[in-house]
Image (cartoon, rainbow, N blue to C red):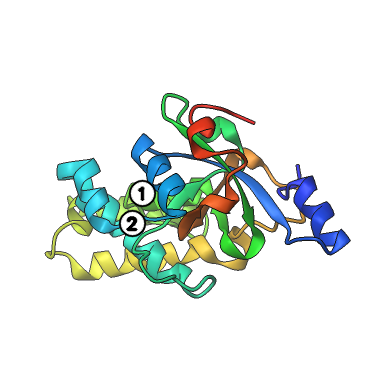
Amino acid sequence: QLLWDSVGAQKRMAGTGPMTLRVYTAQAPVVAEVLEREGICHCRADMIQKKYGNCAPGFLTAYEFLAERAQAFMPRPKGAELPYWVFPDKRLVDQSAHTLVLDVPEEQILLFRLDLWNRVLQLRYIGKDRADTAAFEREMARQGLNTVQVMTTAFYPQWKQRIFESWERLLLPENRMDPVKQVDLQNVQGMVWELRREWLVRPAAESLGVYV
């Protein structure tokens, strides 16, 4: 399945607007309220701390890594600290949460493999291949270590550096999603620096909990 929304593609070919991608994002109702009122929303680190509590350090390690690397592809706008997560496949969005439906311009979204991003979220090593991953995990196990203790403490800098270096594979050209090729939508995740009212398919208050 092609990623780009056909309506957006038609607009671009007709010269009437940019190519857009239809994506879905689960957000708290307060985000929709701010979006309607102010026209734009940014994600801050303190929001992640409040949401995840004691688990926040692990999430922030992953989020801040991607936020830093993503600037090579999309400049970080003023006020944005961390990304918002979006999905071109609505089945991947938490259906118990409120969902916003967005048409995002192509230059405002970065797409990558969901399976690799999940390894980053789990603070795990991304190997060159399965054999490399397995060898690293065996080596770590022989030392009596696990990735959580390595990545959330200051005691294992060499191991931590190896894991950080492996995460660079997330955004290699072969792992970023090409919108004009056939892809498995169930293995695609995206990030945007901000949510904008003009991207909403319908007013945020109406979008909540609705799939298009």
Quadrant containing the C terminus is: top right
Quadrant containing the N terminus is: top right
Please give the name of the residue rendered at 13% of the width and 65% of the height, measured from the top-left corner: 154
Residue beneath label 2, please? 62
In the displayed structure image, the side of residue 118 where residue 108 appears, left or right = right
Packing grade of label 1 (10 A; few <14, some 14-19, many >=20) is some
Q: Relative to the observer, which residue lies in front, 91 or 151?
A: 91
Q: Residue 78's quadrant in the figure?
A: bottom left
Residue 160 on image: x %, y %: 26, 65
Query: Residue pushed farthest right?
Result: 14
Residue beneath label 1, please? 121
Q: Does residue 175 lie above or below 91 as drawn?
A: below
Residue type at mark 1: give it. Answer: Leu
Residue 109 on image: x %, y %: 57, 59
Residue 107 on image: x %, y %: 62, 65
Packing grade of label 2 (10 A; few <14, some 14-19, many >=20) is many
In the displayed structure image, the side of residue 147 where residue 69 appears, left or right = right
Please give the name of the residue rendered at 55% of the width and 39% of the height, measured from the top-left corner: 203
Q: Residue 22's quadrant in the figure?
A: top right
Marks 1/2 in contact by CB < 8 Å: the verdict is yes
Residue type at mark 2: give it. Answer: Ala
